[in-house]
Image (cartoon, rainbow, N blue to C red):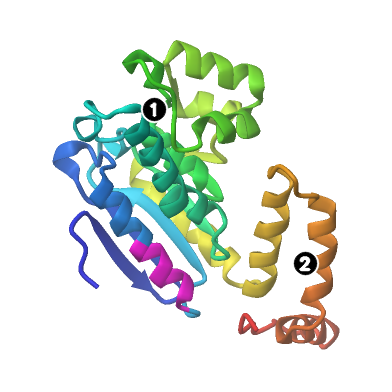
Amino acid sequence: MNYENILVTTQENIATVTINRPTKLNALNVATISDLNKAFKLLSKNNEIRAIILTGSGEKAFVAGADISEFANFSIEQGSQLAAEGQEKLFDFIENLKTPVIAAVNGFALGGGLELAMACHFRVASANAKMGLPEVSLGVIPGYGGTQRLPQLVGKGRAMEMIMTAGMVSADEAHRIGLVNHVVPENELIEFCTNIANKIIKNSPYAIGKAIKAVNANFKEGKNGYETEIKSFGKCFGTEDFKEGTTAFLEKRKAVFTGK
């Protein structure tokens, strides 16, 4: 499938999705959000794809923010609709995807860009990356989940400071506060993420999907994470992956998982 604003490549069981608006520093507009939604939907239905790496084109930015020109004249109702549709189509969708998504943060990840990275299951940053939520400097607040996911990752106090100052943090600071898992040289970023993805895809896709669901449940209002874990744990026992994994362990061989 051809997309206007993104590139999708696959190599064996790993897909790489690249936001491709380098002249706009990969800023998120409505069309790009739609492209990403379509791409992630297709990839999630492809049983051959076991992990996804999300990154930005060029050397300057992962995503330098939302495309402000699109919503500068919006009304209250239009602003609310923009946030609601964006969260449903992309940010919540990625967070709840059963296929692991790794954000390869290459450069600026600001506003909607950092919110997109935070919606991924975890983040790896290049050494030149800078991250922040500058929305209050524009008279608005983060609208794509930033006020919720940033405190979950770095704690309430640090999130409050980052949001209220509208400042940026370096890759090293982001690592120190738990916003990213690793910091690597820029030219090693995709290879590093691919190595992690290769470790992931050796394991049961079914179990990984259930683990994502169980971890996310702890952060959802009205959900009991422990109950979700118990149910998900139990469901694993009825799968071919469980039979294969336990049999392979007992037979002292490597398991070959199908995701069923």
Please state the horizontal and vertical placement of residue 184, each as a whole percent of the image.
45, 40
Mark 2 = which residue? Answer: 232
Q: Where are the magenta residues, as a range?
A: 38-46
Residue at x 41% of width, y 33% of height: 127
First in sequence: mark 2 vs mark 1: 1
**Within 10 angstroms of label 2, few (less than 14), some, or many (20 or more) residues?**
some
Looking at the rendered structure, the kind of residue marked 1 is: Lys
Please state the horizontal and vertical placement of residue 102, each as a whole percent of the image.
49, 53
Quarter holding residue 7: bottom left
**Within 10 angstroms of label 1, few (less than 14), some, or many (20 or more) residues?**
many
Residue at x 69% of width, y 82% of height: 255
Q: Quadrant of the N terminus?
A: bottom left
Mark 1 = which residue? Answer: 130
Q: Is residue 39 magenta?
A: yes
Q: Main secondary structure of the magenta part?
A: helix
Q: Is residue 117 magenta?
A: no
Secondary structure, mark 1, is strand
Q: Is residue 258 above or below residue 67?
A: below
Residue at x 40% of width, y 47% of height: 85
Q: Is residue 163 above or below residue 235?
A: above
Please state the horizontal and vertical placement of residue 88, each as a whole percent of the image.
46, 51
254 lies left or right of 6: right
Counting every numbered tag in the picture gives 2
Please state the horizontal and vertical placement of residue 125, each as a whole percent of the image.
44, 39
Residue at x 51% of width, y 50% of height: 92
Q: Is residue 200 above or below residue 104?
A: below
